[in-house]
């Protein structure tokens, strides 16, 4: 257990199998485990699973978990305030991905609203100390705006009626919101997407323009695929209808491969495999903090499949948007690869919004 890849596989086994913690525990590098768990969005669940099995973690690991829980409480408070603002102004909205990793939480809060104009943002963040982040070309095409909120280390990303790198998915947001169901999570009543729609969304967003697949996404996908009541006919038909079947096929092929390597058994049913394009995407391997795949090969194939779909259904506006995808994706990838790391703030994840969450029942 000397590499981050070995620790990543150990974490997946720990979170998939109830009795996996004892195997390899004595060989763990706790600093490396902390880095892998935190950078892959599974830190809180890792601590919970270890605690449930009576294992005591080192003090630095425990301190990092406590810090992450404070950040999550702050993000939940931000969501509560945004929800109240949207409801007060009659804005149709959904947090499409916020709770798929709960009790862990992503680096930002994704808010999907149906209005495509950014003018609704003044009603959403008007009462918050929020500052908009300068948008690049892709964000303008995609109808996305990012806000930094004072006293909250988690940013707010608002998607205005579109999804995708250049907003190529213009109809699916309505499907997500229409099928959403109310649920109690973390002491709050929230709307969450239907599992089938969430899986289609993963295929839209987890590969195109990305550098890696994080462990949190793999865990969510595996738990969703394992559901015995999952409507695969709907998943495949919906993905095909919206031009997302190639992305979903690529994504599920990688998750299937990772699951087989870790658990030594297949994940996807044979009938599902026959309906997806699982071959030809290239190998995936864990390095540099996540599972990485051949970027040029994958994105080139996805772009071609999506472009053919748009032309085939007569979606000339969508095809036009896709023509800009290589430029936008290339610029973003170059920016991510060449961007200098930001200096760590003295208490970047220790700061929380001033108003506590005790009134909505969220605790450590």
Image (spheres, rainbow, N blue to C red):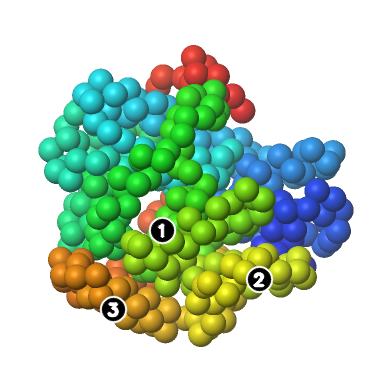
| Quarter placement of the N terminus | bottom right
Measured from the top left, where is residue 205 in percent x and y? 40, 60
Residue assigned mark 2: 270
Q: Find residue 131 and report its horizontal and vertical position in percent.
A: 22, 39
Q: Residues within 10 Å of mark 1 (few under 14, many from 20)?
A: some
Number of residues whose C-alpha sits closer than 10 Å to that of mark 3, classed few (under 14), some (14–19) or many (20 or more)? few
- For the residue pair 307 and 281, the one nearer the viewer reads as 307
Against 136, is 78 above or below?
above
Q: Earlier in the sequence, mark 3 or mark 2?
A: 2
At 35% from the left and 81% from the top, the residue drawn is 300
Residue 116 can be seen in this image: yes
Q: Give the mark nearer the N terminus: 3 vs 1.
A: 1
Q: CA distance from mark 2 to mark 1?
A: 20 Å
* Element under disc 1: helix
Q: Specify the farthest residue to the top.
A: 359
Q: Measuring 77% from the left and 38% from the top, which residue is drawn there?
A: 51
Does 203 sit left or right of 87 as displayed? right
Which residue is located at x 58 percent, y 75 percent? 274
Q: How many marks?
A: 3
Using a 10 Å C-alpha cutoff, classify the residue at mark 2 as few (fewer than 14 neighbours), some (14 to 19) or many (20 or more). few
Residue 326 falls in image quadrant: bottom left
Residue 77 appears left or right of 3: left
Q: Is residue 80 placed above or below 112 in the rendered structure?
A: above
Mark 1 sits on what residue?
A: 238
According to the picture, the residue beneath numbered tag 3 turns out to be: 308
Question: What percent of the width, then of the height, locates residue 67?
Answer: 56, 37
| CA distance separating discs 3 and 1 | 17 Å
């Amino acid at each position: 257990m000397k590499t981050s890849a070995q620790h990543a596989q150990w974490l997946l086994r720990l979170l998939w199998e109830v009795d996996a913690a004892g195997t390899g525990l004595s060989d763990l590098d706790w600093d490396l485990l902390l880095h892998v768990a935190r950078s892959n969005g599974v830190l809180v669940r890792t601590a919970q699973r270890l605690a449930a099995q009576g294992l005591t973690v080192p003090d630095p690991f425990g301190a990092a978990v406590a810090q992450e829980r404070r950040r999550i409480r702050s993000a939940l408070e931000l969501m509560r305030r945004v929800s109240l603002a949207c409801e007060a102004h009659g804005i149709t909205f959904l947090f499409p991905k916020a709770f798929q990793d709960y009790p862990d939480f992503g680096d930002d809060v994704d808010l999907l609203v149906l209005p495509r104009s950014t003018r609704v943002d003044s009603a959403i963040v008007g009462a918050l100390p929020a500052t908009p982040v300068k948008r690049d070309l892709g964000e303008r095409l995609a109808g996305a705006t990012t806000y930094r909120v004072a006293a909250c280390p988690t940013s707010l990303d608002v998607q205005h009626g579109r999804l995708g790198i250049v907003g190529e998915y213009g109809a699916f947001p309505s499907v997500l919101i229409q099928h959403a169901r109310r649920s109690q999570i973390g002491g709050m009543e929230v709307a969450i997407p239907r599992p089938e729609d969430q899986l289609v969304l993963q295929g839209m967003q987890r590969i195109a323009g990305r550098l890696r697949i994080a462990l949190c996404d793999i865990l969510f996908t595996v738990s969703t695929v394992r559901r015995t009541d999952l409507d695969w006919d709907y998943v495949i038909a919906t993905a095909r209808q919206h031009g997302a079947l190639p992305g979903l096929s690529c994504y599920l092929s990688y998750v299937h491969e990772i699951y087989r390597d870790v658990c030594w058994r297949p994940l996807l049913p044979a009938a599902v495999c026959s309906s997806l394009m699982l071959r030809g995407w290239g190998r995936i391997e864990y390095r540099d903090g996540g599972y990485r795949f051949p970027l040029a090969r994958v994105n080139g194939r996805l772009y071609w499949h999506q472009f053919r779909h748009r032309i085939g259904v007569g979606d000339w506006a969508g095809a036009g948007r896709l023509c800009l995808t290589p430029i936008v994706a290339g610029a973003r990838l170059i920016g991510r690869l060449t961007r200098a790391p930001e200096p760590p703030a003295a208490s970047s994840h220790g700061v929380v919004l001033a108003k506590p969450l005790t009134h909505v029942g969220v605790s450590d």
